[in-house]
Image (cartoon, rainbow, N blue to C red):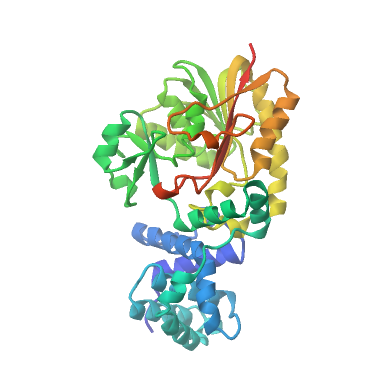
Amino acid sequence: MARPDPARFAALGLIIGVTEDHESLSEQIGQDALDGLEPAQRARAQRLATTTLRHLARADGVLKPHLRRKPSADIMALLRLATVELLEEHQAPHGVVDAAVTLAKSAGPKTSSFSGLVNAVLRKVSVETEAWAKQPAPEMPGWLRGRVMAAYGKRAAQTMEAAHLAGAPLDLSVKSDAPKWAETLGAELLPTGSLRLPAQGKITDLTGFETGDWWVQDAAAALPAKLLAPAPGAQVLDLCAAPGGKTLQLAATGAQVTALDISGPRLERLVENLERTGLEAEIIAADALNWQPDAPYDAILLDAPCSATGTIRRHPDLPFVKNGASIKPLFALQADLLDRALSWLKPGGALVYATCSLLPEEGEAQIKAALERHADLIVTPPDLPGIEPDWITPEGGLRLRPDFWADRGGMDGFYMARLQRLA
C-alpha cells in the first residue's frame, strides 16, 4: 500500500484539532503537532490546514449534494482538505484523489472502509468549478456576527467576511528609509509607511532579513506605536509585548524600552528579533497585574489581551476555537490592565491602549469607561500619515477594519486610542 503524504496527514490532524477539539493551530503546533516533518513539509502542512479552514464552509457547500449523510469527523476533514486542494488550489485531480484515498486507507479500519466513498465523491467534486465559484464568503460565527452587525451594520459585516476569505498579504515594518526598501523588495509603500509584498515566499530568504532591516508586522498593528510616538530617550513601557513587533518599533525611535509579557516562551522570539535587528530593550517576564515598576514612565503602550477577532483573515481557525462566553472575562481584564498601567504613567505622559478586536466592548467602550474613571485624562486624536478621517471615532480613537483598503489587500481589525495624562 502507498504511504500517505506526510504534509497532508499532518494538515488533516491540524484541521481535526481545530474543528473537533477547538484547539488553535498555534496551540497544536506549540504542542509538537508538526514534529518530525522537514521544514518544507511543516510549511506545507500549515498552509494546507490554514487554507482549508478559511474555505471550510465553501467546501461543505460543494460537498453537501454528494453526501447522503455527513460522515465521521475524520472523513469529513479529509474531504474538505481535498476539495480545497482541487477547487481553490487547482491541484491535479488524479494526484489529490489518489492521495486522499491513500490517507483514508492508512488511517485505520474506521476510515479505510470509506476509501471508496472518498474516491467517488472527490471525482465528482473535481469538476465542480462553477459551484465553487458561486459559494459565498463564509459567515462569521453567530456570537461574533451579531455583535459586528449591531456595531457596523449587515453590509459592513459582509465586506469584512469577504476580507477574511481573501486572506492577508505580508506586511513589513522597516527601521528606516521605507521608500528604499520598497524598491529593493518590490513592495508597495502603504500610505501609513508599512511595506506590503505582492507575494509571500520564504521570509528568511528576502533581502534585509539577515541584516535586521525590517520585521513582519501587519500595517494596522504598526499604528499603535506610531500613535504613541515617544521622544528619543523617553522611558517607555511596552505591556503585553510579545511577540514584539511594537517593541522593535519603539526601540527604533531611540526610546528606552521595557518590554513586559506574561509568557516567557513568547518573549524568546522577541529576544531573537532584537538580536537580529540590533535594537535594545529590557525584557521582563511577569504578570502585569502583579508586577510593579521602580519608577513611572513617560509613555506606555498597552496592547491588551483580547478576542483577536480582528485577525481572522490571517487566523481562520479563530472562529472555531472561541465563543461568546470565552471572551467575556477579557472585558474586565482589559479594564484592570488599563487602570494599572495608568497608575504607572507620569503626569503629562501618554498611554496608547490597543486591541486587535472588532468588538466595541474591547475598544471604544473601554476608553469611554476609562475617561469616566479618570478625570485627569484626555484623548489625543490620531494625526498620522495615511489615516482616513472616517476611521477616527467620536471619542477620538482609531477604528480599523479588515475591509478597509480592500483594493490593497485589507488590514487587521484594530482599535487604539492615545490617552494623555494632564500635567
Dividing the picture into quadrants, the one containing residue 92 is bottom left
Q: Nearer the viewer, residue 111 or 252?
A: 252
Residue at 53% x, 45% y: name it.
Answer: 401
Q: Nearer the viewer, residue 380 or 39?
A: 380
| Residue sitting at the far top | 423
Q: Nearer the viewer, residue 317 or 103?
A: 317
Dividing the picture into quadrants, the one containing residue 85 is bottom left
Is residue 302 shown above or below 423?
Answer: below
Quarter of the figure with the N terminus:
bottom left
Position of residue 393 in the picture relative to residue 8 (left or right): right
Q: Position of residue 399 (x, y in %)?
A: 57, 38
Residue at 30% x, 29% y: name it.
Answer: 177
Q: Position of residue 272 (x, y in %)?
A: 41, 37
Position of residue 97 in the picture relative to residue 311 (left or right): left
Position of residue 419 in the picture relative to residue 163 (left or right): right
Residue 283: tell me if it is visible: yes
Residue 290: tell me if it is visible: no
Is residue 179 shown above or below 128?
Answer: above
Residue at 45% x, 42% y: name it.
Answer: 218
Is residue 261 shown above or below 62?
Answer: above
Dividing the picture into quadrants, the one containing residue 142 is bottom right
Q: Position of residue 90 (x, y in %)?
A: 35, 71
Q: Position of residue 2 (x, y in %)?
A: 37, 81
Give the number of callouts.
Answer: 0
Quarter of the figure with the C terminus:
top right
Is residue 258 shown above or below 117?
Answer: above
